[in-house]
Amino acid sequence: MKLDDLRRLNTARHQRQTVLRITDLHGGHDSIVVEGEACDPLFAVPVSTAFRSGKSGSSEIAGRTYFIDVQVPPPQIVIIGAVHLGQVLAQMAQLAGFAIRVIDPRMAFATPQRFPNIELYPDWPDEVFATRPLDACTALVALSHDPKIDDFPVAEALRAGCFYVGALGGRKSHSLRLQRLAANGFSAADLGRIRGPIGLDIGAIGPSEIAIAILAEIVQSLRRRSTAATQ
């Protein structure tokens, strides 16, 4: 591997970016593709497929065999609001293989007793993001139902390109949220990325069913997210 390619790989890993290493099994050179960057049109379809699936494997392209090695940062869910719904969602998401972070400045809610074995931050989101920023392999779930706590992380998730951005609240609350974000410069396309009301529409009732609806929507967004295998 060329030194420049190795540097690109290491940089992508450090920045939690999904990256592919394409190896020509007939003895040609390796190439590196970082998600979000353009690639050779010849590889557009297999690269897009690899980004979506997260699975490595060989591919026949133009009569040659290539091995596409996918290196995906562990997907994580950042939950804003240490509420009861967050407790249930954190447990379910862990079982599904997600890394979890819970952030809530209300110390009465954000306690290890309520969130055992969970990465917990009893701090304001902006303080946490200063050292642990969001990224494209992160799902942001805002559950506090308090604009003073939820609005900033939702805005940061849009800026960071998180693969999922969801916020708890009814249609009226969501409409007011969109107005506040629009006043801060977010476009209609940006605001259209926010899932609100949050979760798949399965008629969920109660925290457990709502958590299932949210987690299902997160998985759907992860597996169907757009990738940039572009020319």
Image (cartoon, rainbow, N blue to C red):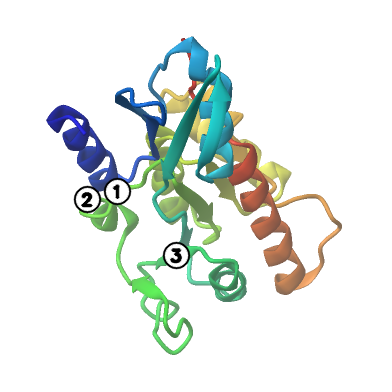
- Of badges 1 and 3, nearer the viewer stands 3
Q: Residues within 10 Å of mark 2 (few under 14, many from 20)?
A: few
Depth order, front residue of 170/143: 143
Image position of 179 with respect to 138: above or below: above
Give the mark, 2 or 3, whose residue is nearer the N terminus. Answer: 3
Q: Which residue is mark 1?
A: 133
Q: Which residue is mark 3?
A: 99
Depth order, front residue of 206/24: 24
Element type at marker 3?
A: strand
Query: Which residue type carries mark 2?
Result: Ala
Depth order, front residue of 25/12: 25
Element type at marker 2?
A: loop
Residue 130 lies left or right of residue 108; in this view the side is left
* Image quarter hosting the N terminus: top left
| Residue at figure coordinates x 28%, y 45% from the top left | 13
Q: Which residue is mark 2?
A: 130
Location of residue 189 in the rendering, given as x and y in whole percent from the top left corner: 56, 22
Contact? badges 1 and 2 (CB < 8 Å): yes
Location of residue 10 in the rendering, given as x and y in whole percent from the top left corner: 21, 42
Contact? badges 1 and 3 (CB < 8 Å): no
Image position of 194 with respect to 32: above or below: below
Residue 137 lies left or right of residue 198; in this view the side is left
Residue furthest out toward the front: 26
Query: Which residue type carries mark 1?
Result: Pro
| Residue at figure coordinates x 33%, y 56% from the top left | 125
Query: Which residue type carries mark 3?
Result: Ala
- Of badges 1 and 2, nearer the viewer stands 1
Element type at marker 1?
A: loop
